[in-house]
Amino acid sequence: MFYREAGDFKTSYTDDSQTFPIRFDRYRYYAVLVAAFAVVPFVINDYWVNAVFLPFLIYAIAAIGLNILVGYCGQVSLGTGGFMAVGAYACYKLMTGFPEVSIFFHIILAGGITAAVCVLFGLPSLRIKGFYLAVATLAAQFFLVWLFNRVGWFYNYSASGQINAPERTIAGVPVTGAETAPWAAYLFCLVFVVASAIIARNLTRGMAGRKWMAIRDMDIAAEIIGVNPLKAKLSAFAASGFFVGISGALFFAVYLGAVEVGEAFGINKSFLVLFMVIIGGLGSIFGSFAGAAFLVLLPVLLKNVLVGGLGWPTDLAAHLELIIVGALIIVFLVAEPHGLAQLWRVAKEKLRLWPFPH
Amino acid sequence: MKLKLMATALAAAMVAGPAMAELTIVDTSYRTGPYAANGIPFSDGYQDYFTLLNERDGGIGGERINLVECETGYNTEKGVECYESTKGAGNGALVYQPLSTGITYQLIPKATADGIPLHTMGYGRTSAKNGSVFKWVFNYPANYWDGASHAITHILNENGGDISDRKIALVYHNSAYGKEPIRTLENLAEKHGYELMLLPVDHPGQEQKSQWLQIRRERPDNVIMWGWGVMNQVAIQEAVNIRYPMDQFIGIWWSGSENDVKAAGARADGYKALTFHNLGDEYPVYDDIREYVVGSGNAAGAGDQIGSVLYNRGMYAAMLAAEAIKTAQEMHGVSSINADQMRDGMENLEMTEEKMAALGLPNFGPEFTVSCENHGGNGFGAVSQWDAEAGEFELITDYYQSDQEIISKLVAEDSQQFAEENGIEPRC
């Protein structure tokens, strides 16, 4: 009944190759956008923004970035935390160095700087693959965290080694700092999320994305048919770094406001984003959102149910949370190795025939 | 999937509605993760004291206390979530005691904007001592810079007042917390002429072989430690392993609890740690805690921490909060105070010996007065030493004041910088 293509005729190639070719799907997408931009900002409060929406949106950008590298280009990276730190520190240096420039451009520039750093650390990918590349990017993770902790210039020689986001406004409305209204922070991140998703979607279905996927599926074959591995791999690192950098900048400037590199961008962060990508679905933009939602919202939900709803002790709830999230990850991956995105695809197939499957 | 999750989350958030009570105290504890060994006793002490007030006196000034606990895991993201979810609990949270310097840095701007006081007792941002700039942040009775000075003064006293030929190493948690004392120690090094050696340890601190190898090679005369959680145990074990003289090893007050030294066994004997309150359970208040809290089965956690160093500290923090509530109630003539009035209570708090004795805690902590200019107390502290045989820390010095000459200059500089960055006009 839903998601049926019957009667949905396309008369041009543009129509036929759009992201949501099925009319029902397209309207659903528009409805989500309208709700996200025009409804949610009016109903959310501090708690919903800071505990649910901001982390979800920001991790979704990071997951999109990592998905380009791991899911589309097949280059395993464990350096996401470090690259997010590059975005955060680049944003901080730009914010404090050029206070007159809009924060919007600082965040984009921070993405650009991260892309450059990411390309640098992506160079070894031309010679090493798979697990060995994972180890090389792991080195990037530790090196970058060490660097930001060690060199005072990055944190403007503050006594604590922390970086703090000063207040910055867009059209007079603060989007960073303590005075930020919940809706402003939310909308600011939402704009970046939607733009990132659209750019990533178009990158991955265009020439660049096809090259990445060719490299992922078999790099020697790709080289034989004329894909330049140097350009393809490094462009994947650059695109990935760009999005990860943006998410790191937003994570620091809008979400947390003050950041300590070892704690906020440690190895745990790299794994968290990698899990999001794997659980959400490798090589899927929707999967990035689904994975981020799963790993950000589930712990908050469990905490609210166990502590708030059932009144259990907080330590018991915290331990159970780890067990339940871990168990669910295993269950999901056993039941559907291609992640939540594949579950969604299957659900759509089923809905198409529902309620008469035969 | 996502929508369904969010709908359930919404439903859960609604179920978790406020329990109506008059005075809401939030305990942002951590009973899980690498810092749990230290987080549990502090949180138990903090909660038990409020439970005692509820059970014995029916609350404070006739108002019962609504205790809300939230698990942060010493993680800043969870800390933010906790803060946002609890700040509106009941009639609004009165005070936050995050017990984490990282979370404190996070909360200073947020709490200032929301108008909720923060009490960062012996941790957090040291320059918050300048209440003229940090209106909502309090760090009495002592702060990290006081602690650094206490340690150096103790070494001075041990060595007849001359330490110009000594080499002192600082082993610190490589985070905002551990970096706090560096500037003070550098300034003190200029004054006293000792050589300072910095050895950072990365979170969570389980891996310290290379730092202690360096100590073994360079043989510093004294080691000062700024550690927390599992880092303390590992450092003390490593010091024992390289046979470092334990009486030359001084930890900050966060590195001086029983959990930290017990693992290293008898050879940890003689390890020193700073403190800003007394130790042991030889106080009348503990009889009441045993009777009203443990006896009635309301003890927080497993109830096995009573009298330990960090339990005492948690209880001390709760006692200071309760006294601030009393002060606020007297000042404003209402028993059901709000966060704004709580702040006034904290700013006019006066801790005297009579007050503490009346509470069943005679001579438990230093006397101090809080004022608009001074949110940090007078910087008194003492040194305690671990007696492995008796299994307890014992005070080996009287309370003495930190080097105010150096510290007040540093506080003024740092708070001035903060005021400029954030466009704050000093209040007084």
Image (cartoon, grey):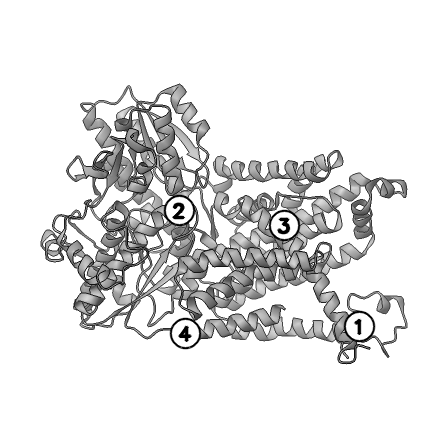
For label 1, the residue is A22
Q: Marks 4 and 3, how far apart in space? A: 35 Å
Q: Residue at x 62, y 52 (%)?
A: A275
Q: Marks 1 and 4, how far apart in space? A: 42 Å
Query: Dividing the picture into quarters, in which one does residue B2 lie?
Result: bottom right
Query: Disc 3 on helix, strand or loop?
Result: helix
Nearest to viewer (mark 3 / mark 1): 3
The kind of residue tagged 3 is: Leu
Give neighbour class at mark 4: few <14, some 14-19, many 20+ (Cα, 10 Å): few
| Marks 1 and 2 on same chain | no
Give the total number of marks visible in the rendering.
4
| Label 3 chain ID | A
Picture coordinates of residue A253 (x, y %)?
A: 52, 54
Q: Which mark is residue A65?
A: none
In the picture, the quarter occupied by the C terminus of chain B is: bottom left
| Marks 2 and 4 on same chain | yes
In the picture, the quarter occupied by the N terminus of chain B is: bottom right
Given residues B41 and A75, the one toward you in this image is: B41
Q: Which mark is residue B17?
A: 4
